Image (cartoon, rainbow, N blue to C red):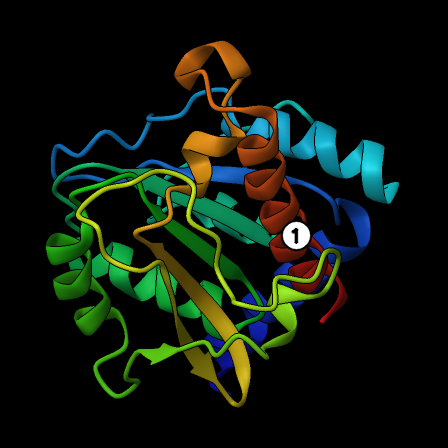
Amino acid sequence: MSNYRLFFGVILLFAFISNAQQIAVLKYDGGGDWYANPTALTNLARYCNDKMGTTLSTDIPTVEPQSIDIFQYPFIHMTGHGNVLFNDTQIENLRNYLLSGGFLHIDDNYGMKPYLEKEVARLFPDKPWRELSSSHPIFSSYVNFPEGLPKIHEHDGNRPQAMGIFHENRLVLLFTFESDLGDGWESPEVHNDPPEVRRKALDMGANIIKYVFTN
């Protein structure tokens, strides 16, 4: 590990120790609606606190990819429907964050996949996407999903997929596609999803949270 990454690894380790159960939303450039699903993470944090005894803050901060503040948060969530752009400084900072112990969950709210793929190829040109099999522990860390990622909202009739980027056998980036977990985390009146659908989404979100904070 370079001195640069070691330095930021120490910062991230301190964040784990001192503020270990804080999650944040990534504000990115390009015109995509990074602010989509405004109630999602607050609801997920409350659910995890209630069901798993976590102490996640329900006050969800926003962080930008070029900011040193990103290293305060072991878990960062990103969503939206449209374009995603990172400049070179943002790419370098995000890469160092992830290689130093951070985790990024990207949930396609519908339409961001083609833009995201270009930027992730810049972020990790030497690390291919790998689809997570249904036996991956992220699908059973809290509630067992024997078929893998659940379907929450229909988009194009395709099966839901969980794609990952790994570094030294550690999952550093998770991309959930054709599932729309974030919509399922939203308050009930937003999409009028049946309780059992919201429960599936929140259980899968709890799986991700538990996996990240215990691995």
Instruction: Please say if 170 is above or below 36.
Output: below
| Nearer the observer, 85 or 211 | 211
Report the residue marked by disc 1. 209
Q: Position of residue 57 (x, y in %)?
A: 71, 30
Q: Position of residue 12 (x, y in %)?
A: 63, 60
Instruction: Locate the C terminus by quadrant.
Output: bottom right
- The local crowd at label 1, few if under 14, some if 14 to 19, many if 20 or more residues have their Cα within 10 Å, is many
| Nearer the observer, 70 or 201 | 201
Instruction: Please say if 4 is above or below 150.
Output: below
| Nearer the observer, 24 or 92 | 24
Write the residue at 17% across / 64% down. Answer: 117
**Of all residues shown, which one is farthest toward the top?**
189
Write the residue at 48% across / 53% down. Answer: 150
For label 1, the SS is: helix
Residue 87 placement: quadrant: bottom left
Three-letter amino acid code of the residue under disc 1: Ile
Can residue 214 be spotted in the picture? yes
**Of all residues shown, which one is farthest toward the right?**
53
**In the rendered view, does 18 fall on the left or right side of 108?**
right
Instruction: Please say if 71 is above or below 124.
Output: above
